[in-house]
């Protein structure tokens, strides 16, 4: 079903960015208003797909102070698009990439989302995931 995903540290929502990285990859951002993501069960893991763009979230091997996180513009599933999700504290969750074992996180750059090796209770890599109507 559909969810919104909000970062604990800065209180902003996971959204697509208006900027593409290249023709296949779009940046993701943190923003004041929410966007809808479809949470899909994928075996023992999950996938997140932007509802309006039909683009799957994934962690890239491209790195600069943490791995880049994009949506995949060609619309199909990607190998680095599976995540494990588990509770960090009541109402908040870690979102960890299966391939790289990094956690989705807000970063020191305002509005930027990256993936980092540590999953810690610092708020930066803790997310409120709320079920909403599609």
Image (cartoon, helix red, strand yellow):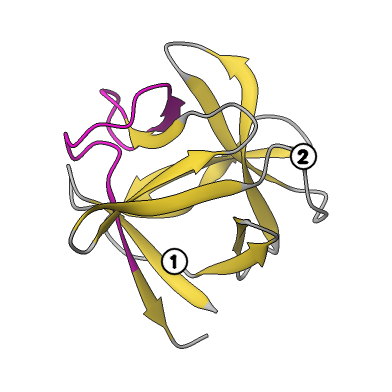
Q: Position of residue 56 (x, y in %)?
A: 67, 53
Q: In the image, is residue 18 above or below residue 98? A: below
Q: Secondary structure at mark 1?
A: loop
Q: In the image, is residue 81 above or below residue 92? A: above
Q: Is residue 11 left or right of residue 34?
A: left
- Residue most extreme to the front: 44
- Residue most extreme to the top: 64
* Residue at which label 2 appears: 79
Q: Position of residue 16 (x, y in %)?
A: 51, 51
Number of the label disc, if any, that sits on residue 35: 1
How many numbered dots are placed on residues in this image?
Answer: 2
Residue depicted at x 45% and y 54%: 15
Residue depicted at x 33% and y 38%: 111
Report crowding for label 2: few under 14, some 14 to 19, many 20 or more residues within 10 A (C-alpha): few
Q: Is residue 134 left or right of residue 114?
A: right
Which of pointers 1 and 2 lies earlier in the amino acid sequence?
1
State which mark lies toward you, 1 or 2: 2
Q: Is residue 94 left or right of residue 20?
A: left
Residue depicted at x 60% and y 70%: 51
The magenta-colored residue range is: 107-129
- Distance from disc 1 to disc 2, alpha carbons, whole Å, reads 24 Å
- Residue most extreme to the bottom: 133
Q: Position of residue 14 (x, y in %)?
A: 40, 52
Q: In the image, is residue 5 above or below residue 25? A: below
Report crowding for label 1: few under 14, some 14 to 19, many 20 or more residues within 10 A (C-alpha): some
Residue depicted at x 78% and y 36%: 23
Q: Main secondary structure of the magenta part?
A: loop
């Amino acid at each position: 079903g559909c969810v919104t995903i909000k970062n604990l540290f800065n209180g902003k929502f996971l959204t697509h960015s208006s900027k593409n990285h290249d023709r296949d990859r779009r940046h993701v951002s943190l923003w004041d208003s929410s966007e809808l993501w479809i949470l899909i069960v994928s075996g023992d893991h999950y996938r997140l797909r932007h509802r309006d763009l039909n683009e799957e979230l994934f962690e890239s091997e491209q790195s600069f102070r943490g791995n880049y996180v994009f949506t995949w513009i060609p619309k199909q599933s990607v190998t680095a698009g599976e995540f494990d999700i588990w509770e960090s504290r009541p109402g908040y969750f870690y979102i960890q990439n299966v391939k790289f074992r990094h956690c989705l996180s807000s970063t020191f750059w305002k509005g930027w989302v990256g993936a980092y090796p540590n999953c810690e209770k610092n708020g930066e890599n803790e997310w409120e995931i709320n079920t909403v109507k599609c």
